[in-house]
Image: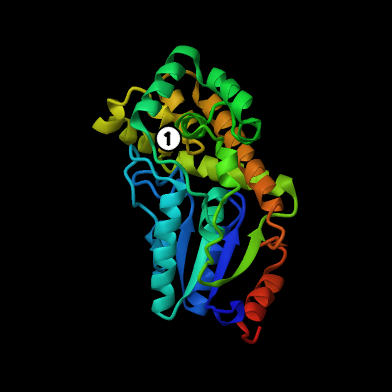
Amino acid sequence: MPIHARPPAIALMGPTASGKTALAVDWARRIGGEVVSVDSALVYRGLDIGAAKPNAAERGGIAHHLIDIRDPWQPYSAAEFAVDARRAVEGIVARGRIPILAGGTGLYFHALLRGLAPMPEADAGVRAGIEAEAAARGWAALHADLARVDPEAAARIHSTDAQRIQRALEVWRVSGRSISDWRREAPRERFPCRVLKLVVAPAQRAVLHERIARRFDAMLAAGFLDEVRRLRALPQLASHPRPLDLPALRAVGYRQAWEHLDGRFDAGQLRERGIHATRQLAKRQLTWLRGELDARWFDPAADPARLDAALAAFLGRPG
C-alpha cells in the first residue's frame, strides 16, 4: 500500500515529565483516537505512582493499551513490545480510530516503527553462566569484556545496565557474532500506518528540570515509598536473589527508593538521587530524540497552536 493511502497514526515522543500523557488524551478525545503506551515502566503492574502511570481520571475514558500487562518480576523485551503494539495498532485502525503512540522509551519506538534484527534465542545455560560471573566479578568487569568483543555495544550500554550487558554477551557467546552486527541486519518490515512524529519537550532544559523535581516531590507526597514497600512484600520479589537487576525495578526512582528502604541513605538523599536519576534519564531520552531526524519538535507550553496546526495538516482537517 502506498504511504499516502495508509491510515494515520501519531507518535508523541518526549522526555519524562514533558506532558505527553495529557496531550495524548486530549488529542485522542478530539480526533477519535486510542492511546498506545510506549513506556517500559508502564507495562508493569504495581508500578503506578513512581512510573507516573495515568489513573482512570487522567485517562479520561480514553482506551489505553500496553499498560499493566506484566508482573514486576517478569521480563518484557522490545521485540515482545513490537508484536503487542502492532497488534494494538491494527485493532485501533480496524475500529476506525486513530492510534496515538505516546511515551519516551526510544528502543520501543524503534522496535515498532523500524523493526528489530532477528537475534539468537535466549540460552538459559549461557545466561546462568554470565550471571555467575557477574556475581563473582561484578557487572563493570563484564562490561569491560563486552568492550573487547563489541566496542560499539559497550559504548551504547551503561556499565550498570545488567540486562543489556547480559544479552549482548549472550548473543556473542551463542552465535560468535556481536549484537551490533546482528542489529545491522534489521529487517525493514513496513509499519501499517503513515506516522506523524512529534517531539514534545520544553525549550529550556531548566524548565524540564523543575518539572521533574516537582513531579518527584508529588510522587513522594502521594505515597511512593508505600508503593515500593508493597512491591518489596511480594513473595516473588522478596525471594529474588537480586531484585534490583529486574527490568521493572531499574525504572527510574524505584532503585533509589528500594535502596533507601534498605537503609543505604536517608530521605533527603532519596530525593536528591531520585531527581538526579530522572534528569539523567531525560538527558538520555533527549539524546536519542535528537537522532530522530524526521520528527518535529514543539514546546507543549509555548507552541499549542503550532502543535494543533501540525496535527490538522497531517490529518487533512481544518485547523
**Farthest bottom residue in view:** 318
Picture coordinates of residue 183, whole percent (x, y): 57, 45
Residue at mark 1 = 249
Residue at point 51%, 21% (across, down): 139
Q: Work out which residue is located at the far top of the displayed protein and give it.
A: 136
Tell me, yes or no, if residue 31 can be seen here.
yes
> How does the figure colour the protein chain or chains?
rainbow
Q: Nearer the viewer, residue 81 or 36?
A: 81
Element assignment for label 1:
helix
Q: Quadrant of residue 11?
A: bottom right
Residue at point 53%, 40% (across, down): 217
In the image, residue 45 lies at what x, y percent?
A: 34, 46
Q: Is residue 231 left or right of residue 270?
A: left
Front one among 212 and 42: 42
Q: Nearer the viewer, residue 151 or 272?
A: 151
> In the image, what residue type sits under mark 1?
Leu
Residue lying at the far left in this picture: please name it.
Answer: 235
In this rendering, the answer to whether 318 lies above or below 94 is: below
| Residue at x-position 67% and y-position 55% | 201
Q: Is residue 287 above or below residue 139?
A: below
Please tell me which residue lies in front, 253 or 65: 65
x then y, percent, for residue 224: 42, 39
Q: Quadrant of the N terminus?
A: bottom right
Mark 1: few/some/many CA within 10 Å (<14, 14-19, 20+): many
**Direction from residue 231 to residue 60 in the image, left or right:** right
Question: Which residue is drawn at the image coordinates 74% and 54% (left, top)?
Answer: 203
Residue extending farthest to the front is: 176
Please tell me whether residue 31 is drawn above or below residue 38 in the rendered image.
below
Which image quadrant: the C terminus? bottom right
